[in-house]
Amino acid sequence: MNAIAYVRVSTSEQGRSGLGLAAQREAIKAFAQSEGMIVEQWHEEVETGKGSDALDRRPTLAKALSEARKRGLPVLVSKLDRLSRDVHFISGLMVQQVEFIVTELGRQADPFVLHLYAALAEKERQLISSRTKAGLKAAKKKGIALGTAGRKASSEQLLRAGAASTARADEFAKTLRPHVRTAMADAGNSYTHAAVLLNLAEQATAEGKAWDRRSVAAVVRRLTALKLWP
């Protein structure tokens, strides 16, 4: 059976790093191989998935849908949120007469199940937003500076400042892995918001300073290079 694959990240930074896109590709390739499927086309997009009208802002997804409908092929995505976390958007896709296969849910997940997962994903997004706002409010009360103003050192310099060698920097990143993973999950994979949560947890960087989005991204890149992420 042939199929069309769709991968998406929501920010230009994620698109430039290629990390999120690569992980989705690997998940889809593994699923296709296990199911005896051949991916004929890959459609890649860097665009937010928010809003029930997101399809209007995602021409690549629209193209994938058109191609799949014309050729009678299913569309493979690694996770449902790569389509959207908006239940109305998912509902709209279900009437496109195109079969969607979410690799993490399996081939047998019917439209009703996808609607349920979409509703849960939408609720999760709302909870993430609430936690982030609460974290930002708490950070301001503690006097923690937000953003990257005044921090001119590169992310790699921040890591090297607390390590005498690459090996020591790698070991330091390994100790941070559970903390960064939790913060990234709670922040909806936002480096900026993850930095806020790490600061609230009073978890210091290699230099012993407050976190910003660059220092979080640096740890993620190092752990990825070590094949320890996510």
Image (cartoon, rainbow, N blue to C red):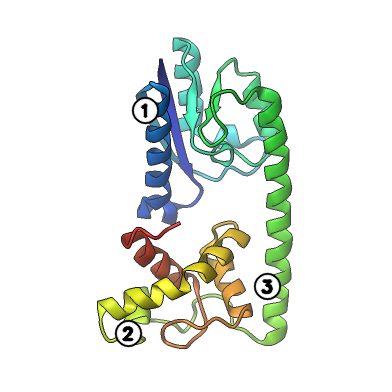
User: Is 128 or 165 nearer to us in this picture?
Assistant: 165
Residue 13 against residue 30 in the figure, above or below: below
Which residue matches tag 3? 136
**Tag 1: amino acid:** Gln
Q: Secondary structure at mark 1?
A: helix
Estimate how packed mark 1 is, as few (under 14), some (14 to 19) or many (20 or more) residues with alpha carbons within 10 Å: few
Horizontal side of residue 200 vs 68, given as left or right: right
Q: Position of residue 68 (x, y in %)?
A: 47, 18
Q: Position of residue 54 (x, y in %)?
A: 60, 37
Q: Position of residue 139 (x, y in %)?
A: 67, 79
Estimate how packed mark 2 is, as few (under 14), some (14 to 19) or many (20 or more) residues with alpha carbons within 10 Å: some
Residue pictured at 67% horizontal, 26% vertical: 92
Distance between mark 3 and mark 1 Cα atoms: 44 Å
Is residue 8 in sight in this rendering? yes
Q: Which mark is residue 33?
A: 1
Q: Which mark is residue 206?
A: none
Q: Secondary structure at mark 3?
A: helix
**Tag 2: amino acid:** Ala
Horizontal side of residue 90 vs 229, given as left or right: right
Q: Position of residue 132 (x, y in %)?
A: 67, 65
User: Is 76 or 196 nearer to us in this picture?
Assistant: 76
Residue 116, quarter of the rendered image: top right
